[in-house]
Amino acid sequence: MPAAPQCTILCQGCKIIGRDSFVFQTTAYALMAHIQSNRFGKTERDLTMTWMNSMRNSFAGFSSTQDTIVAMEALSMYASQDPNRNEFDLDVSLTVSTDRDWSQSVHIPENDFTRVYRTYVSCLWSNHGCLSLGDVHLVLKDVIASQGVCDDAFANTDDNEDGGDDDDEERKGDDDDDDDDDDGNMLPEHRVFGFIRSVSKGVGRAMLQLTTTKRVEFQKYLKTQMHYDNDPNKDLIQFFDIDHSLDFTGRNNSIMFLRFCCSWAYTERSLTSGLAVLEADLPTGYVVMNDTLRDYVRSGVVPNLRRAEFYGRKVVYYFDFLDQSKTCVDIRADRWYPVANITRENRVRVYDYYEPGMHSTRNYTVEDLHHMNICLACGSHQCPYCPNFNTAATLARAGFLTWLLLLLVFATWQCWLRRPGR
């Protein structure tokens, strides 16, 4: 008889849909109820924990803030019920298929299960740009018993063998103060492909996570919203509408004026949205002062605007709600740092705060900035080799040639006046 085919579960990021926040929160409450009632059938409890960990949206976060807090509470309660916590002792080693000399080893004793270990796999340049297989997070927060379990970080294996996570971070994306970044053991750039393999031995519970990122510059490659009935053959649901206008002033486009207008479009569900968030990425080198944004909010120009902030090259606006009429916000960004050859596309996104799967994402183009060289972007005496703004030597030579030409004309005119017969 032919051998039964093996099913490989690829490690792919979960696709967030419009109801994910309610799904995670409901599952977390179900897990806590299962634990508190002390029901039999711990396999069901373990499967629930494993599924919740597989649905994480990046490190320590789920779909939104509220469901993340409830999920962390449920996972913490799950870990506290483990009767083998005093016996935890685990060794984990990481290797990569493309470089035999690259490895990472971690020993986790019973009194050190709250530390997050990280290693970074460098950036791989390809025809599609920079693919970063970086930030291999080993979240060593109580790990399930495993004896010599070997799995791939690039191909997700059965989590029942390798365990889940008891990560009690309070907010999505928070960093642990005890993180260990081993930059000295970074994998070389030309080796960033293939598989990352983990081998764990001992008793414990941990989650091994591989985070990959890439940058896209075309609308068709952006993360899309869900389809009607979650059927890929049907149209995409239009949750929000986004329009924008862009203008530059200054000698070298040093001041940028942006205007974004957004509105609620999914009226089949309700006439208005809930708490909505507008995120707009700014070109590199441009800055908006938070004091300016706070004054803009307090001015009441946009009645339903409650908060605005700038961080990480991104301007974020928080609205109480959005309705079918256009709500517009204005942004003035000033160039603080001269950067040339800026990317042509920048992202703008509107989403529901409690249901991030309900979103609309667009790109806006800054073609003028994309074609600027460093001399045009610098625009001051700080660029010594740029003739556009440092022309003292050129002007000196031009003045000398002008005086020489005038002297030659004067001498010719004098010779013409002194000619015999005049």
Image (cartoon, helix red, strand yellow):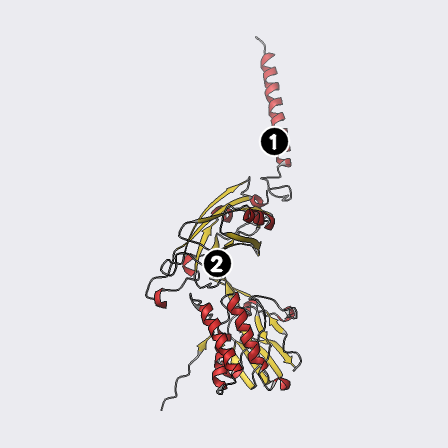
Give the secondary structure at mark 1. Answer: helix
Q: CA distance from mark 2 to mark 1?
A: 63 Å
- The extreme top residue here reads 421
- The extreme left residue here reads 233
Q: Is residue 309 above or below residue 100?
A: above
Tell me which amino acid carries mark 2.
Leu
Q: Is residue 327 above or below residue 399?
A: below
Return the residue at label 2.
Answer: 275
- The extreme front residue here reads 37
Q: Is residue 304 visible?
A: yes
Tell me which amino acid carries mark 1.
Ala
Residue 194 percent coordinates (x, y)? 50, 73
Residue 320 percent coordinates (x, y)? 49, 55
Image quadrant where one finds the N terminus? bottom left
Return the residue at label 1.
Answer: 398
Residue in the image at 66% along x and 78% along y: 112
Q: 195 and 199: which one is in front?
A: 199
Residue 160 percent coordinates (x, y)? 50, 83
